[in-house]
């Protein structure tokens, strides 16, 4: 989905404190102490900008002394996005006028987790907070995009390096719930991958379809599938790898050097193959998969599981956008029921 925005479950006090800690600072060195005159000027700026926390952060923690201009650059179908040009460089800012900061905290924690793997480029988050008039904002590193999505083989290799580098000791899930598009994504830590995927991915979407559309047919057949998917994982090595979670073409780009960039995540720790669930609109080709599997070897049964991971995203699109995606989801369910004789 184009933008990850929805109300998240409240994080634990320790998680919130950690998020506040790393999001409140931009990791740039302070080269010299401010003069008294400059400090006085800063105080005046802060007083004048007290009602604009975005500008206030940029002109204090962001180390800028001047905002030269702003311009809209598109933020998907849910958020607004702007580029702030300053004498300390550009910043990327997303805002939402309706939903509180918890949504962007989930995005920021995912971005920071991916950034810390030092594998594939992602924008570094700097600050999340509420807007005085309601809603929330996130300030992050501005990355100038190149003219293409870059080399598919480099994207595949770097994505695999991220999956290989970041594993969880807590099992499958994430530190907070987040969103997939505007749908809540439940990330309760679970020791067993099949249980996690069945309950918090497929099961949640099926229940949502039942409540939203009264679709008992897809719900009942989907529940039958859930009860019978374990044989699809025979022989596979399952590890909780850090996933972007929403990897489609709109969330993949490259920087001006041609290195791949991924953004707008719905991160969690899951089976690495689940990363390909949006492949039906990601444009992954043979070069991508060949490079990926050189780092993360293909597991037995990969082809049989592929559509199972597509199903989560088809169900989500059905719940978000309506009946146009129902037939694709139902077809996958019915094909698996036949394959598994369930």
Image: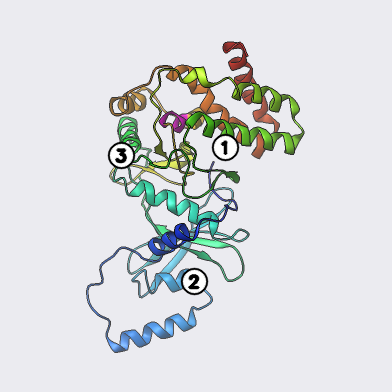
| Other residues around mark 1 within 10 Å, as few (<14) / some (14–19) / many (≥20) | some
Q: Can residue 317 be seen in the rendering of this structure?
A: no
- How far apart in space, not on screen, are marks 1 and 2 (Cα)? 35 Å
Q: Quadrant of the N terminus?
A: top right
Q: Provide residue 321's location: percent of width, then percent of height.
A: 66, 38
Q: Provide residue 40's location: percent of width, then percent of height.
A: 36, 88
Which mark, by number, is residue 257? Answer: none
Which mark, by number, is residue 165? Answer: 3
On the image, numbered disc 2 is attached to which residue? 53
- How far apart in space, not on screen, are marks 1 and 3 (Cα)? 24 Å
Q: Earlier in the sequence, mark 1 or mark 3?
A: 3
Would you identify the image quadrant in which residue 29 lies?
Answer: bottom left
Could you tell me which residue is drawn at 65 percent across and 25 percent down? 223
> In this picture, is 266 found above or below 9?
above
Q: Provide residue 73's location: percent of width, then percent of height.
A: 48, 54
Left or right: 303 with respect to 136? left
> In this picture, is 270 found above or below 28?
above
Q: Can residue 169 be seen in the rendering of this structure?
A: yes
Left or right: 135 with respect to 167? right
Could you tell me which residue is drawn at 58 percent across and 52 percent down? 9
Q: Nearer the viewer, mark 2 or mark 3?
A: 3
Q: Nearer the viewer, residue 231 or 301?
A: 231
Q: Most extreme residue toward the right, as rendered?
A: 214
């Amino acid at each position: 989905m184009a933008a990850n925005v929805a109300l998240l479950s409240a994080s634990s006090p320790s998680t919130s404190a950690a998020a506040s800690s790393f999001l409140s600072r931009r990791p740039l060195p302070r080269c010299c102490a401010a003069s008294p005159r400059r400090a006085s000027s800063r105080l005046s700026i802060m007083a004048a900008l007290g009602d604009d926390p975005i500008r206030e952060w940029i002109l204090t923690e962001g180390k800028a002394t001047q905002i030269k201009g702003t311009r809209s650059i598109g933020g998907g179908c849910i958020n607004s996005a702007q580029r702030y040009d300053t004498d300390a460089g550009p910043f990327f800012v997303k805002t939402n006028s309706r939903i509180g900061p918890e949504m962007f905290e989930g995005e920021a924690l995912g971005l920071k987790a991916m950034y810390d793997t030092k594998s594939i480029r992602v924008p570094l988050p700097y600050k999340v907070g509420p807007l005085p008039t309601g809603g929330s904002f996130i300030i992050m590193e501005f990355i100038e995009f190149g003219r293409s999505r870059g080399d598919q083989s480099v994207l595949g290799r770097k994505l695999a390096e991220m999956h290989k580098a970041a594993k969880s000791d807590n099992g499958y899930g994430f530190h907070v719930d987040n969103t997939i598009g505007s749908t809540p994504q439940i990330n309760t830590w679970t020791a067993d991958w099949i249980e996690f995927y069945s309950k918090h991915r497929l099961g949640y979407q099926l229940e949502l379809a039942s409540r939203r559309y009264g679709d008992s047919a897809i719900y009942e057949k989907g529940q039958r599938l859930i009860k019978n998917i374990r044989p699809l994982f025979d022989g596979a090595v399952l590890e909780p790898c850090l996933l972007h979670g929403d990897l489609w073409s709109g969330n993949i780009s490259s920087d001006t050097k041609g290195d791949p960039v991924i953004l707008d995540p719905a991160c969690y720790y899951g089976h690495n193959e689940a990363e390909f669930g949006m492949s039906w609109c990601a444009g992954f080709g043979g070069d991508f998969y060949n490079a990926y599997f050189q780092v993360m070897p293909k597991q037995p049964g990969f082809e049989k599981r592929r559509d199972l991971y597509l199903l989560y995203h088809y169900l989500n699109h059905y719940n978000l956008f309506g009946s146009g995606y129902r037939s694709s989801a139902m077809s996958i369910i019915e094909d698996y029921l036949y394959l598994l004789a369930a």
